Structure formats: structure tokens, C-alpha cells
């Protein structure tokens, strides 16, 4: 009966070490001419099964604890990501406002230089802030180039009028 039970236990992957320990115990008992009993066999493997069950319960408890720790780490990472995104949005909005103010200032300076001031209500344009920023950048460049070329032409005209 011990040999049959031992054969079944050897097929269980988590009982391999317990079977090896039992075989060593049997060798010691054979040398001392004291036969092993079913009661000793039962006590040995009951202890091993209980130890295995305790380890599995501990691992499950640790798994649950690890899961909670992982959830906390994920929450921290999500909060950091949200804070980063919020900072990027604030930065984008600040750039948008600065470009809009710069555009208004350039528009005011070019319209003050011209005699034909046409006042019209501001147009409602529905574009995304990123598109608006790129459009504003291009307009700013073109207005800067236009104002610098008009001031250069005024200088050249004044140089022509002075004569030699």
C-alpha cells in the first residue's frame, strides 16, 4: 500500500521533494532494521500536504497584496500622466494667448501705419488651437516681413529725396 501511494504522490509535481525525503527516510529505516509503518507514511505526507496548502494560501494572500500594490502604482502613474497632460495643455494655451496678443499688436501697428483703417467686427473662425497656432505663426512672419519691407522702402525713398 505504501508503494502504491508513493507512486501516485510521485506523479504530483509539488510532492516530488516529499517523495525524495520519504525514500531517504526508508533507506535510513532499512539500515536500522526498523520497518516503516503506514502511520509514519501518513504523518509524513499529511505534514507535506499541509505545508503545501499553507504555502499556496500565503502565495494567494501575497498575490492579492501584490495586486493592490500594482493598482496603486498604476493609479500613481495615471495621476502623473494626467498632471503632465494638464501642464502641456496649459503651456499650449499660454502659447496660444501669447501668439494671439502678438498678432493683435502687429495688426494694430500695421493698421496704424496705413491711412485706410477699416474697422470690421472680428470674424468667428472655428479651428483647433494647434491649427490656429500654426496659422498665427505664419501670419506673424508675413506681417513682420511686410512691415520690415515697408520700412525699408520708406528709408530708400528718403535716401533718394536727399540727393547728392
Image (cartoon, grey):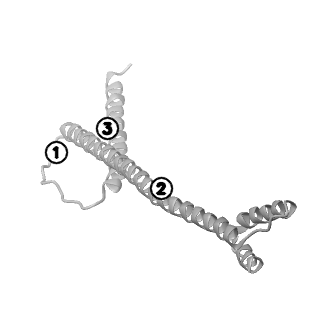
Image: 30 above or below 77: below
Image: 111 above or below 82: above
Task: Give the Cα separation between the discs numbered 2 and 1.
Answer: 73 Å
Q: Residues within 10 Å of mark 1 (few under 14, many from 20)?
A: few
Image: 99 above or below 21: above
Q: Which residue is mark 1?
A: 116
Ranked by sequence position, the earlier of labels 3 and 2 is: 2
From the viewer's perspective, is the residue at label 3 or at label 2 nearer? 2
Q: Residue furthest front?
A: 34
Q: Residues within 10 Å of mark 3 (few under 14, many from 20)?
A: some
Q: Secondary structure at mark 2?
A: helix
Quarter where residue 142 is shown: top left
Q: Which residue is mark 2?
A: 66
Do the residues bearing badges 2 and 1 touch, measured as CB atoms within 8 Å?
A: no
Frontmost residue, 33 versus 83:
33
Task: Give the Cα separation between the discs numbered 3 and 1.
Answer: 16 Å
From the viewer's perspective, is the residue at label 2 or at label 1 nearer? 2
Task: Give the Cα separation between the discs numbered 3 and 2.
Answer: 65 Å
Frontmost residue, 43 versus 138:
43
The residue at the point 37 percent across, 43 percent down is: 141
The residue at the point 34 percent across, 47 percent down is: 83
From the viewer's perspective, is the residue at label 3 or at label 1 nearer? 3
**Residue 62 x, y percent position in the rendering:** 49, 57
**Residue 15 x, y percent position in the rendering:** 69, 68
Amino acid at each position: 500500500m505504501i508503494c502504491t501511494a508513493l507512486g501516485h504522490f510521485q506523479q504530483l509535481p509539488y510532492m516530488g521533494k516529499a517523495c525524495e525525503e520519504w525514500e531517504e527516510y526508508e533507506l535510513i529505516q532499512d539500515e536500522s532494521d526498523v520497518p516503516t509503518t503506514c502511520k509514519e507514511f501518513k504523518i509524513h505526507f499529511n505534514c507535506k500536504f499541509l505545508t503545501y496548502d499553507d504555502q499556496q494560501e500565503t502565495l494567494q494572500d501575497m498575490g492579492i497584496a501584490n495586486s493592490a500594490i500594482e493598482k496603486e502604482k498604476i493609479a500613481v502613474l495615471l495621476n502623473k500622466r494626467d498632471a503632465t497632460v494638464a501642464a502641456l495643455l496649459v503651456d499650449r494655451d499660454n502659447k496660444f494667448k501669447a501668439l494671439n496678443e502678438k498678432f493683435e499688436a502687429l495688426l494694430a501697428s500695421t493698421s496704424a501705419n496705413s491711412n485706410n483703417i477699416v474697422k470690421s467686427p472680428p470674424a468667428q473662425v472655428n479651428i483647433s488651437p494647434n491649427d490656429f497656432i500654426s496659422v498665427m505663426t505664419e501670419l506673424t512672419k508675413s506681417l513682420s516681413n511686410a512691415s520690415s519691407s515697408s520700412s525699408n522702402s520708406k528709408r530708400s525713398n528718403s535716401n533718394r529725396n536727399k540727393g547728392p
